[in-house]
Amino acid sequence: MEYGDFLQCVQEYAKKETGSGGVVSINHVIKNNGCELDGLVIMEEGKHISPTIYLNGFYKQYQNGRTVEDIVREILHIYNENKDNIQICPDWFQDFDRVKQTIAYKVINYSKNEKLLKKIPHKRVLDLAVVYYCLLSQSEGETATALIYNNHLEGWHVTEQQVHEIAVSNTPGLLQSQIYPLSSLIGLVLEDLKMEKELLMAAEMYVLTNNTRLNGAACIFYEDVLKKFADTLQTDLYILPSSIHEVILLPKLARYDAMNLEDMVREVNTDGVSREEVLSDKVYIYRRSDGFITMSF
């Protein structure tokens, strides 16, 4: 079957399994960096919220010989495992006084998300876009979020600037920043300054993220986070956008060349980061003198 026929077939099988009274639909979702996915939504009678189960990966399994019946059984298992984990009152999202306490921001690439940005409030900064979402729950390595769209602002009768100000105020408290040596993450054994150049660079690199390690690149815009760290090192900083989840901080020293660093970022984005998690191919510079972040080129 072609992909469209596969989606329709899965939807029909799911309807048979769930019985009457509910609605089974397929939603087309635009994710980060132009990744577009199709999700199956099973809405039982009397319910107003349900998990979305993306089907793109299942189609690849079908192409490799797995039957639609077997795929639907797994989808229903996933649905039943997760359907009661969403503890949101249907009217909650309409009450802005409650919603605003959960509003946070993250950063994504501007040019790679032009289609999505037409649908959501955002603020452009450098080659990035600051976008807003509701943080519904969080733990290390796992969060439940809901992206804020333009029609949400209309329903809440608030402006984009109001949402931006709330997000700027909330995010550092909801998602605390963390900075730690890259060496502690990858288990480098650092001996002395006679080490090779690459090892010396790794010894001077630091990871900046948040306490969940999800969408932590936004921490570069937290008030005073970069300032305090740069003051500690007494130098300007290179900021290497390793993904939407974290950035690498490196002292801006003469032995490091911005062009070489940018080549390194591009290589990591090509080989080491999924398309949806790429933030930017650019290297940024934090200036201690005025607290500004600029692009290296």
Image (cartoon, grey):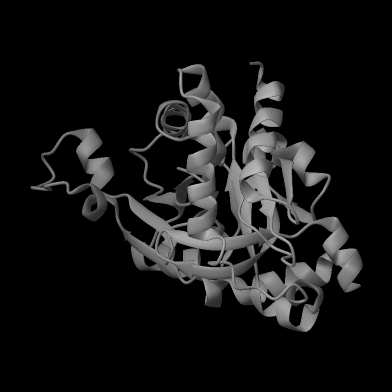
Q: Which quadrant of the figure contains the N terminus?
A: top right
> Is residue 78 at least partly visible in the picture?
yes
Farthest residue, direction bottom: 97
Q: Quadrant of residue 97?
A: bottom right
Q: Which quadrant of the figure contains the C terminus?
A: top right
Q: Is residue 124 above or below residue 180?
A: above
| Residue 169 or residue 288, whichever sits in front | 169
Q: Residue at x 37, y 46 (%)?
A: 253
Q: Position of residue 33 (x, y in %)?
A: 64, 37
Farthest residue, direction left: 191
In the figure, is residue 121 to the left or right of 214? right
In the figure, is residue 156 to the left or right of 97? right
Q: Quadrant of residue 93?
A: bottom right
Q: Position of residue 237 (x, y in %)?
A: 45, 52
Q: Residue at x 64, y 36 (%)?
A: 13
- How many labels were placed on the picture? 0
Q: Quadrant of residue 284?
A: top right
Q: Position of residue 147 (x, y in %)?
A: 69, 57
Q: Residue at x 83, y 63 (%)?
A: 152
| Residue 165 or residue 15, whichever sits in front | 15
> Is residue 278 at least partly visible in the picture?
no
| Residue 296 or residue 102, whichever sits in front | 102
Q: Position of residue 137 (x, y in %)?
A: 54, 70
